[in-house]
Amino acid sequence: MYEEFYGLREKPFTRTPDPRFLYQGRKHAEALARLQLSVEDQDIVLLTGDIGRDVEEALATKLDVLPIVVLKSPHHGSGTSSIDEFMQKLRPRVVLISCGRANPYGHPVPHVLGRYASTGSLVYRTDLDGQVELTTNGLSLRVETFTGRRVPRA
């Protein structure tokens, strides 16, 4: 099973280490990576790592590369991530959540899944979908999962 998203323009991939997206958290350094696949000079993939509420609040005022098409869910969909302001600004079409089946932390938590639903995002989860693969030809984005699970539209 796969989903296709159209409207991408062919431009090269670049990895951009941007100091604006590095944040020294209280307990550890938190980083955000930006994989730049551009559509009319806007980034469309955001890889967030384990950022939490503090970093999201700071980034919400700095992100000028919107809309985001693909968001790697911050901190595995924990309750300290994906704050409403951040999600409403990004409004991703696809959210990828990396989490283990029956993990002891309960990730992703229901209220974070609700935030994703409120933005109309399609949510792919490694605990339900197994491997999630994204491919693009520069014009469309294809999402394919190991299990073939149909992802309901919000």
Image: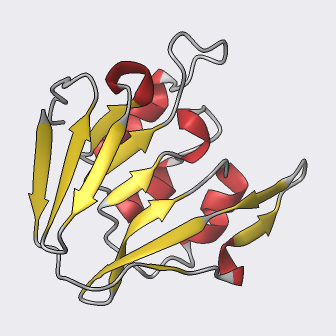
Say above or below: 149 vs 96: above
Q: Quadrant of residue 141?
A: bottom left
Say above or below: 16 vs 2: below
Q: Residue at x 39, y 65 (%)?
A: 45
Image quadrant for the N terminus? top left
Say above or below: 94 vs 112: below
Q: How many marks?
A: 0
Of the pair 80 and 15, the residue shown nearer to us: 15
Q: x and y percent of residue 92 in the render?
A: 32, 56
Image quadrant for the C terminus? top left
Q: Residue at x 63, y 62 (%)?
A: 57
Q: x and y percent of residue 41 in the render?
A: 32, 90
Asked whether the viewer can see residue 117, the reply is: no
Q: x and y percent of residue 79 in the render?
A: 60, 32
Of the pair 7 and 133, the residue shown nearer to us: 133
Q: Residue at x 13, y 44 (%)?
A: 3
Q: Residue at x 66, y 12 (%)?
A: 104
Q: Is residue 6 left or right of residue 12?
A: left
Asked whether the viewer can see residue 58, the reply is: yes
Of the pair 23 and 142, the residue shown nearer to us: 142
Colour scheme of the picture: secondary structure
Q: x and y percent of residue 136 in the render?
A: 22, 64
Q: Is residue 16 left or right of residue 139?
A: right
Q: Quadrant of residue 122?
A: top left
Q: Is residue 69 left or right of residue 127?
A: left
Say above or below: 52 vs 132: below
- Outermost residue toward the bottom? 41
Q: Quadrant of residue 106?
A: top right
